[in-house]
Image (cartoon, rainbow, N blue to C red):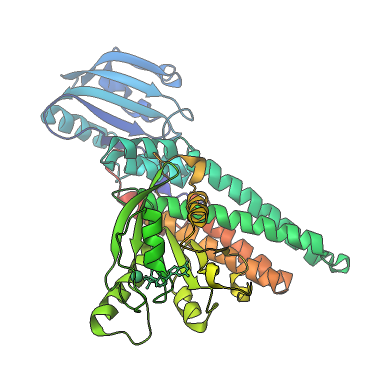
Amino acid sequence: MGTFLNRDHDPICALATVWGQSAIAVLRLSGTKCGLKIKERFSPALNEQTFEKRFVRVCRFNDQNGVLLDQVLLIHFPGPHSFTGEDVLEIQCHGSPIIIDAILEILIASGFRLAEAGEFTRRAFLNGKMDLLQAESIQQLIRANSLRSVREHLRTLDGFVSQGMNEIKSRLMNILGQIETSIDFPEDDVDLSSKEQLTTEMVHVSERMGQWLRESQLGQRNDRIPHCVIMGRPNVGKSTLFNALLGTQRSIVSNIPGTTRDYIQEQIIVGHVQVCLTDTAGIRSDPEEVEALGIQKSIELCKKADLVLFIADATVGWCNEDMELFDQTDGRLRLILMNKIDKVSTNDKNLPEKMIRETVLHISSFSHEDIEIVKNNIMTTLKLEGGDQEMFITFNQRQNACVKEALSCMVEAEGMLVHGAEMEIIAIKVREAMEQLAQMTGENISEHLLDHIFSQFCIGK
Ligand SMILES: Nc1nc2c(ncn2[C@@H]2O[C@H](COP(=O)(O)OP(=O)(O)O)[C@@H](O)[C@H]2O)c(=O)[nH]1
Ligand SMILES: [Mg+2]
């Protein structure tokens, strides 16, 4: 939690509604016993006792000379049961800019200061009324441009995303506990089964974070349809698979490498889910110019894809060129398809060690059953958190960066565990992941970053 500055306790005020002529305007005040500072302005008079309670009251608001300025509705929310956690007073006056300005002037003369952008929400966060994810969702809610987006941000405000985060945080805490025990009691030596259990637990956490990132990426896309890109060397059978999944002859299939020079996109239904499927240009080391442009485009498409269907030719086996290309899709969700198994007599399934955690299917694009298997795998791989196709978790840039960093720490830690690295070093990585998630929910965030986040808010929120 950031340090509390004096300014985080000052009595503040702001117009919460839009400045201009309107039926009613709402002025919001926050600070310890802030209502007492202006108690003389109201008639009937308000006293210390009234401000201890929650109330709604119609009264007159007078200027410093006792002259009536407006009839107002006064609502008092005593802290800590208020939005900011402090005593909050809301003055609903008539929506005249003259009245609004006059009341604000009186408030400032009575010791209030005009609130900065997002300062009410900042206080709510600092007083533990909500975490940073929830606080940020308020601004996103106000800026939402569709009803669906409104519902998604309301869900975040309700704590749905925070709950998931906290679950992961406590799992990470457990993992760290196990690692630290093995550091403290090295004589017990981590036995194989507990190491396996630790790996499983770490993989689970990473998968969950990966799922969030994918869902957020999907939620930010206009069409909100998962993009699935077929990639692989020329002639491995990309276009054949594309046509088979589509059920038509959309893409040209030939045994001349480089036949598909651009990319082709179609939508298919997999299970009950619509998926945008892309057939890309074959990727070769010395292509001609037109094809080279197509290849560049293919790599770009893969980098943005929700799922990469990576095809290799089973009759050739996994070769160096496959590996080079495959490396370009790191960080993406992928399915590896060893194609043309109808032509392979020996069943050599050896793949490099790097691919232990990848899903590999041995298929023939000519077989209906195999195409169904591919479809099923697409469906299960793209499964979304909660299985909800309508609502997505949508991280902002800051949140996204935190989860991404936490995930990469965990992937590194897993690799280290598999390769038998020192437990101390693995613990450092897990701790780093935890810090990233803590920063995401605002547990250990700097004053500077808080200033930046809330400066993007509306005044009066
Ligand atoms: N035997 C066999 N041949 C296939 C299979 N899939 C594709 N092919 C053949 O491989 C060649 C290249 O296919 P194509 O789809 O154009 O490959 P692309 O360059 O990766 O798009 C064509 O002659 C296809 O008929 C398969 O599963 N089994
Ligand atoms: Mg092709």
| Location of ligand 2 given as a quarter of the image | bottom left
Q: Name the image quarter holding residue 21.
A: top left
Q: Is residue 252 left or right of residue 179?
A: left
The spot of residue 61 in percent (x, y) is 22, 20
The answer to whether one can see residue 10 in this image is no
Q: Name the image quarter holding residue 108.
A: top left
- Counting the numbered discs, the total is 0
Observer-nearest residue: 326 or 10? 326
The answer to whether one can see residue 157 in this image is yes
Observer-nearest residue: 44 or 373? 373
Instruction: Identify which residue is drawn at 16% across, 33% down.
Output: 101
> Considering only vertical position in the picture, is 192 above or below 440?
below
Q: Is residue 123 left or right of residue 261?
A: right
The spot of residue 138 in percent (x, y) is 36, 40
> Considering only vertical position in the picture, is 411 above or below 223?
below
> Considering only vertical position in the picture, is 305 above or below 58?
below
Observer-nearest residue: 417 or 302? 302
Q: Is residue 446 left or right of residue 38?
A: right
Instruction: Identify which residue is drawn at 37% across, 76% down.
Output: 255
> Considering only vertical position in the picture, is 88 above or below 244?
above
Q: Name the image quarter holding residue 362.
A: bottom right
The quarter in which the C terminus is drawn is: top left
In the rendered image, the residue lying farthest to the right is 187
The spot of residue 310 in percent (x, y) is 46, 67
The spot of residue 345 in percent (x, y) is 61, 73
In the rendered image, the residue lying farthest to the bottom is 286
